[in-house]
Image (spheres, rainbow, N blue to C red):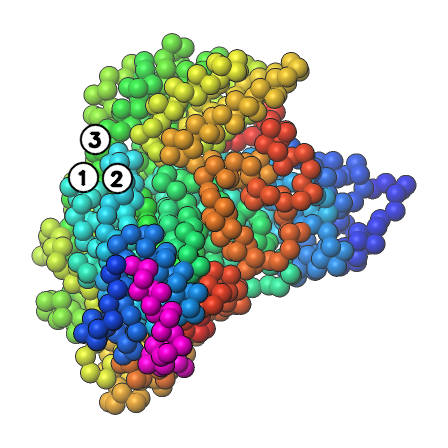
Amino acid sequence: MKSPEASAGLSDGAGIAAVAAATANAYSDTDALDRYLVDGLRPAIAVCPSTAEELAAVLRAAATADLAVVLQGGRTAIGLGAPPTRYDVALDTSALGAVIDHVPDDFTITVQSGMRFAALQTFLADHGQFVPLDVPFPDQATVGGSVAAARSGPRRGVFGGPRDWLIGCGVVLSHGATVHGGGRVVKNVSGYDLCKLFSGSLGTLGCIVEATFKLRPLPAADATLIIPAADLDAAIDLGRQIALGVNGLQSIIALDPVSAHDLGLDEAGVVLRAAGVEGAVSSTLQLAGAVAQAGSAIQPEPTAPDFWQRLTDREGTSPRGNAVLVRCAAPPDSLRSATAALRAATDQTCLWAYADAGLLFGQLAAPTSALLPAMVATARKGIEALGGSLVVEHAPVTEKCAMDVWGPAGDGITIMRRIKREFDPNATLSPGRFVGGI
Amino acid sequence: MTGMATPTPFVRDLQEALGRDAVIWALEDLLVYEYDGTFDRGAPEAVAFPASTAEVAAAIQIANVYELPITPRGAGTGLSGGALAVRGGLLLSLNRMRRILDIDPNNRTALVEPGVVNLDLSVAAEPYGLAYMPDPSSQRACTIGGNVAENAGGPHCLAYGATTNHVLGLELVTPDGTVQWLGGPNRERPGYDLVGCVVGSEGTVGVVTKIQVKLMPKPEAVRTLLAIFDSMRQASSAVSGVIKAGIVPAALEMIDQQTIAAVEPVLHTGFPLDAEAVLIIEVDGPVSQVQAEDAIVQEIVQSFEPREIRVASELPDRERLWAGRKGAISCLGHIQPNYYILDGVVPRTKLPAVLDEVSHIAARYDVQVANVFHAGDGNLHPCLLFDDRIPGMSERVLDAGGEIMRLCVDAGGAITGEHGVGLEKRSYLPWIFTDDDIDAFARLKAAFASGDTFNPCKVFPSGHGCGETSSAHAQKVIQQFGADAYV
């Protein structure tokens, strides 16, 4: 592993200068660079290009000089992934914040990737529209970063992730060429689907500079129903029963007492969200209440956006102390076994689950941080036995170096490595951060 | 089987690996495999019918030994020439792999082989109250494997998305003959979205031998509304009105006056011949939602002063409303013996202007045109009607088709919404993608396969040995009237 200091040494000095020359916004003073730490590593230079052309010039200069670039936007998911094996240039996309094209009646929007996610949603709300993705810390998170990190939230069981809403993209590759996938129409099978390739690629294949989304109308009514349960397992059982018995819900969340408390609720339970036309929403929630035999005392209430945003933010919040945040995916019907697998790894857990999507999040703590890697390995083994997967979303840096945050990528790893070689042959982009050391 | 010719060593190796009855090689037997839903042709040297993943891999390896091209094929209903063995070699028919391996009602997934017919999966899921949502109009014939290759759509993908939104995992045999499982059982697997890359790659990166798909609850209620309009503009405004009201209908379909003229005498749908447009709007979901949405939709549509509105909730009544739309293509044959179906997409708001221009182009080439289209997502299917016995007619139709494609591109659209690029439209690819973009496609392809023997002459605009067909104007992509054509 090349240390940041070595990267910025004499041999790379000319390369750094070339990167700096490619943009008016280059920073190399320590204070500025401290804002771009990645897993404790400091880059030799940080750049914040103000146009896509400048950004391409930066990447070309960096690749030519064999410098390593870590792409970043709002840095809300900067803890995701293994520590980079090299890190010379911080490439900050947040100056690319413009709306490029929006024809409201087409229900599509094209924006630059550095636009903040909340700014995008606010802009769209004025037109009665939204991108149906929930992103942690949207005031900071950028559109490009949210796509690259495949962020989504409590409504993913219904709406999926960025890959399901991104219909066009412009991406700068490490040799400086800009490539496009998809287009600006909602139904399109022209050419290979590069939008899928770049969604969730964590900045290891190219820098997304432009994104086109298809949109949904904002619902007229949006309501929430909270049904208490004895504990998480009871909440999951209830959630599964509702998932299989009631159609039209957008979120079915099971909370353990700790996560419920963090969200301002008194006890464990299931939280449901329904949205759509007036009339349908309340009857959907009432039906869910009846399925859960929750009694008439429990009434739906208008959705508090703050509640759902705080729930979403938990997906991007690093736990305090000697703890990690893990995201587990498993067949929805095995969620209870999945909670058991996490509890078998440690008795200090804070868990919540998306009962419709088969997702389980957990803050897992250990008595000492040195025990974290083994704890993660145990938890992963249990989840994989269910046919699922476990990704460490947040971990203390030192322990992160000692664990595999992604776990195995399966049979596809050979093709994934070839894709990386084809698109970024010198491993300029975020080297070492992704699955299998990509 | 013919007693006269003798099988080549390549054919004998295939027979040995797959069994004699799993290989077709005699010229007269091959004839039917030279075609798909287009009018182009490509003759394979042999057709193999593997019954398992291992046999698919074995057949691929044998073709590789002889350095012969390989072209996978489903039901052959494709409308872009994607399943044609343009450079000969091995045609891999997946029709024997048609088992539904698993339906998991609790996790709402199904595992199927590629040869399973689209509709058969929904039929199998029905006892569980579930359905497979992508519903291309050819769903009684087309296979899930072909749907995966083309990222097939259908009338209901407006609300539910296309095939790519419903595939969770795949077993893929890559062009070098290795077998791998990608994705599944849900979307949160770490790594690049290889499933998303394979879906819609038009059978150019490997053969899909198992598919895990999402099933969804069958809608509790469905309400279909049909409205007849005096003007296309009014009908288009009604579509905009519904969408602006915050409703995402399950389907929003339209046919134009020329199509009405074709449909009415055959199906007796009661459409007035002087009406310019018939609009179908379908809403589905929980009962309460459908009731509420239907009331809003009716009010909006009414405000645009249609000549007539018909509504239906029960299946036989709804099918009657759909008859004119679903039967439209087969009725066109009563006007002219041949038709050529185009598949363009434009931003939805550009539809009325583009449709006007389509009729101008058709007039300029003196070709009749009938339009059926997915009004909700801007996907138009102009059908050029003609008689190919008239000398020079086919060429005129192809030229008109090319100009209409160009029109879609110039309106900010794309060259295919659901039929694929295939052989037919690969020359148009540079209209919407730069050299750098196409180079990126090539890099992605190279990660799955080296060389150009796997499904050659498809998607990419260049490629050697593709013959006459590689030129857009020389392509005989004329759709002949027949029951095997769908949109």
Marker disc for residue A127? 1
- Mark 3 vs mark 2: tell me if same chain: no
- Which residue: 69% across, 46% down? B91
Q: Three-letter amino acid code at disc 3? A: Ile
Residue B12 seen in the figure: yes
Residue A319 versus residue B199 in the image, above or below: below
Query: Residue A203, percent across and down?
Result: 37, 63
Give A421 or A182, whichever is nearer the viewer: A421
- Which residue: 24% across, 89% down? A367
In the structure shown, which secondary structural element does the residue marked by tag 3 occupy? helix
Neighbour class for label 3 at 10 Å: few (<14), some, many (≥20)? Answer: some
Neighbour class for label 2 at 10 Å: few (<14), some, many (≥20)? Answer: some
In the structure shown, which secondary structural element does the residue marked by tag 2 occupy? strand
Residue B68 versus residue A7 in the image, above or below: above
Q: Three-letter amino acid code at disc 2? A: His
Q: CA distance from mark 1 to mark 2?
A: 10 Å
- Which residue: 75% across, 59% down? B65
Q: Chain of mark 2?
A: A
Can you say which quadrant of the picture contains the N terminus of chain B? top right
Left or right of B291 on screen, residue A174? right
Q: Which residues are magenta?
A: A1-23
- Which residue: 41% across, 45% down? A182
Q: Which residue is mark 2?
A: A102
- Residue at the top extreme, as displayed: B274
Residue A86 versus residue B24 in the image, above or below: below
Task: Quadrant for residue A49, please give it.
Answer: bottom left
- Mark 1 vs mark 3: tell me if same chain: no
Query: Residue A147, percent across and down?
Result: 32, 57
Q: Which residue is mark 3?
A: B296
Q: Are marks 1 and 2 in contact (CB under 8 Å)?
A: yes
Magenta stretch encompasses residue A288:
no
